Amino acid sequence: MTGAVAVLEPPVALAELSTDLPYEPGSASRARQLVQAALTGWGLGDLVDDAVLVVSELVTNAAKTGCRLEMTLRIIRLTAASVRISVTDGCRVLPVRIEADDGDVSGRGVDLVHKLTRGQWGAVPEPFGKTVHADLRLGRKP
Ligand SMILES: Nc1ncnc2c1ncn2[C@@H]1O[C@H](COP(=O)(O)OP(=O)(O)O)[C@@H](O)[C@H]1O
Ligand SMILES: [Mg+2]
């Protein structure tokens, strides 16, 4: 056989953890705990450090909108080596990536998510808000 051979990842049962969180500062801490527990349980412990940073930024940004009583956090095992973290909030304004200067203390969250996911993030408008997702994969670091 000639030509490129696709490298398929082993099949894995789709697993998803979903929870509603209030628009409070404490929700970021709860989200970090859930991400750590889910990824460790799925054998994706090497993604925990990056995933904890990502979920903190997404939940904190959603909490700032204050558009609905609760946001929805989803942690989804996409494949044996990758996970999606998404946060649905009640605000239709989409996130923007700001390239912050060294001295800037704000405007770093989306840029950090962009870097940690290597651009594998996005925001999808929905009738009553939007979902921001970020995908992390094992072995994506240089
Ligand atoms: N969930 C969100 N809903 C609405 N706007 C958002 C959301 N997340 C980010 N943004 C917008 O993108 C900008 C950049 O976000 P970020 O890089 O996290 O910086 P910061 O939170 O410090 O303002 C925010 O200032 C805001 O305008
Ligand atoms: Mg932010």
Image: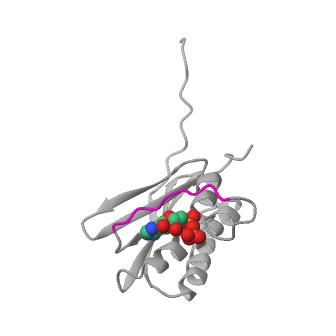
Q: Quadrant of residue 19?
A: bottom left
Q: Is 22 in front, or is 136?
A: 22
Q: Main secondary structure of the magenta part?
A: loop
Magenta stretch containing residue 8, yes or no? no
Instruction: Name the one closer to the observer, 115 or 30.
Output: 115
Q: Residue at x 69, y 70 (%)?
A: 105
Residue drawn at point x = 48 percent, y = 80 percent: 63
Residue 31 image point, x, y percent: 56, 78
| Residue 113: x %, y % from top left | 59, 59
- Number of dots carrying numbers: 0
Magenta region: which residues? 92-100
Relative to the observer, which residue lies in front, 45 or 108? Answer: 108
Is the C terminus in the top left, top right, bottom left or bottom right quadrant? top right
Q: Is residue 117 left or right of residue 71?
A: right
Q: Residue furthest left?
A: 127
Q: Residue at x 36, y 57 (%)?
A: 124
Task: Indicate the position of residue 118 as horizontal and vertical percent values.
Answer: 61, 47
Q: Is residue 10 visible?
A: yes
- On screen, residue 112 versus residue 13, left or right, reads right
**Whether residue 75 is visible:** no
Determine if the magenta segment contains residue 93: yes
Q: Residue furthest top?
A: 2
Display coloring: one colour
Q: Residue at x 41, y 78 (%)?
A: 71
Q: In this rendering, would 134 be left or right of 123?
A: right
